[in-house]
Image (tube, helix red, strand yellow):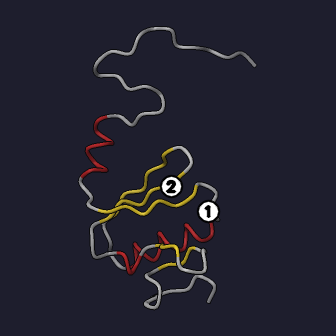
Amino acid sequence: MTKHHITQPVSENQKLPDQQPDWLEDLRSSFDAEVHLPADISREFLSAALLWAIDNKLDFGLFNEGDKIIIAHFGGDEIYLPSRWSDKRWHIGIEDKEPFDPGD
């Protein structure tokens, strides 16, 4: 397999490969809260969480940043989104107020 390297300098309007484009940063910054999930979270859990958010008509953005998956959202929507509980596991909702268990 041949590897190609970009050797031209990065201009003011360009981003390095590990940086998000300006329009994407602007979109992400329009939300006021984020949930940072590990990139190796199970696809079944992520699917259940996103479908639950959609069913509850949440406005959110999904971003991939290196070793994490980010769900950007508006404050107050936390009850419908994943959070890490005291048992060190990811669940959908706030601890002691879980609205949904994907295992049910």
Q: Is residue 11 above or below residue 31?
A: above
Image quarter hosting the C terminus: bottom right
Answer whether labels 1 and 2 touch (C-beta < 8 Å).
Answer: yes
Q: Is residue 23 above or below residue 8?
A: below
How far is disc 1 from disc 2 in space, using C-alphas?
Answer: 9 Å
- Residue 18 horizontal/vertical position (percent): 48, 33
Residue plotted at (54% across, 74% down): 48
**In this rendering, position of residue 63 left or right of residue 21:** right
Q: Determine which residue is flagged by label 2.
A: 69
Q: Determine which residue is flagged by label 1.
A: 41
Residue plotted at (34% across, 22% down): 14
Closer to the camera in the image, 24 or 76: 76
Crowd tier of the residue under label 2, counting other residues whose Cα lies within 10 Å: few below 14, some 14–19, many 20 or above: some
Q: Quadrant of residue 24?
A: top left
Amino acid type, label 1: Ile
Image quarter hosting the N terminus: top right
Residue plotted at (47% across, 69% down): 50
- Residue 79 horizontal/vertical position (percent): 38, 81
- Residue 65 horizontal/vertical position (percent): 48, 46
**In this rendering, position of residue 69 left or right of residue 9:** right
- SS under mark 1: loop
User: Which callout, 1 or 2, points at the residue further toward the start of the chain?
Assistant: 1
**In this rendering, position of residue 28 left or right of residue 54:** left
- SS under mark 2: strand
Q: Residue furthest right?
A: 1
- Residue 84 horizontal/vertical position (percent): 52, 73
Q: Quadrant of residue 53?
A: bottom left
Amino acid type, label 2: Ile
